[in-house]
Amino acid sequence: IITAHGSIESAVEAIKKGAYHYLQKPFDFTELQLFARQVLEYHQLKSEVKTLREHASKLLRTHDIITRNPQMLEMIDLAKRVAETNLSVLIEGESGTGKELFARLIYQHSDRAEQPFVKINCAALPENLLESELFGHVKGAFTGAIKDRQGRFEMANNGTVFLDEVAELTPALQAKLLRVLQHREFERLGESVTRMVDVRIVAATNKNLETALEEGAFREDLFYRLNAVRLRLLPLRDRSEDISLLIQHFLEKFSPDTDIQISPQAMKALRLYRWSGNVRELENVMERAALLANNGQVEFSDLPEEVRLAAETTEQLLSLEEMEKRYIKKVLQIASELSEAARILGIDPAT
């Protein structure tokens, strides 16, 4: 609303009735342009928020990986195709990008889907405990081994083993894993009986295994065995088109009985954030936001401080083009003649 006769009361009343902003004459034309762009952006975001929930629901019926990013869709297609084989798969991606979801997708589309899916995090245990966890042990193999115990490979026989953070395996365990891949055999810790096992291995890492090879930290022969097919998952910061979809998905997940919406300002802030923790970090943020949301809507104030600060900082940064426009305008206001303005700006007066 633009008016020459404004008051605080009339401004409040106008905004209550749906006005986005209130300008009182005289006003700066640049200011009007800025608010016009903001209004347009506000309504575009509002319209998109309204339609995203339905779009996200359609995607969810297809698979558990929420994306419309072309490269990620290619990875989904490749995962489904390789699932029909018995090849080992290596999934690379930063923490929180969905490596386990892809491992489960491969498992669910394979002919081993009715057999066990067994996961182990190779970074979660020290070497002696990890060896026992993977291959099992017999009574007396070490202090505290009071009875025989199956390892994860035996538990997963005829199924799929998901080795998360495989780059953390020690050289000794890498050698034992290579033997399973090559010969489908192993021994439990503390015994000499060779046991046979039939498993499909899907491995994941958040590190660059080529670098580990160069440094001698990872066996080359094991790398090529695991790397029969490689899936590379993008970080969320390179999948900006997925952020809105994921937000709606998580709101539905954490408030299934409540139709929670998200304000355009909150949506914009979430899009501007860098998401170093990827999808997992976004999920945690939306779980908190769904809990704090009042009157069925997530507001900017419901977001964590780091997200709000990042958005506010980005908003304060002017584009180079905008800074240039403001500088030229200021020079034109100060200079007495166009020739003087051209000299200050370092351009031809005819420009």
Image (cartoon, rainbow, N blue to C red):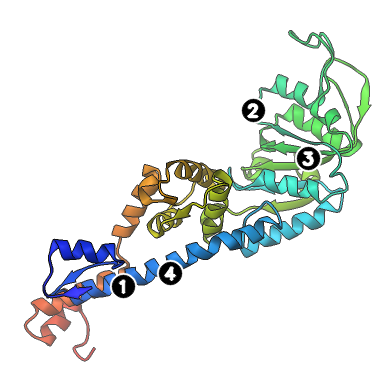
Q: Amino acid type of disc 2? A: Ala
The disc, 2 or 3, on the residue closer to the chain's N-terminal end is 2
The disc, 4 or 2, on the residue closer to the chain's N-terminal end is 4
Q: Residue at x 74, y 49 (%)?
A: 105
Label pair 4/1, CB-CB below 8 angstroms? no
Label pair 2/1, CB-CB below 8 angstroms? no
Residue 39 falls left or right of residue 329: right
- CA–CA distance between discs 4 and 3? 51 Å
The disc, 4 or 3, on the residue closer to the chain's N-terminal end is 4
The disc, 4 or 1, on the residue closer to the chain's N-terminal end is 4
- CA–CA distance between discs 1 and 3? 52 Å
Residue lying at the far bottom in this picture: please name it: 350
Of the numbered discs in the image, which one, if any, rests on residue 44? 4
Q: Where is residue 173 in the image (x, y as percent from the top left)?
A: 76, 28
Mark 1, Cα crowd under 10 Å, few <14 / some 14-19 / many 20+, is few
Label pair 1/3, CB-CB below 8 angstroms? no
The disc, 1 or 3, on the residue closer to the chain's N-terminal end is 3
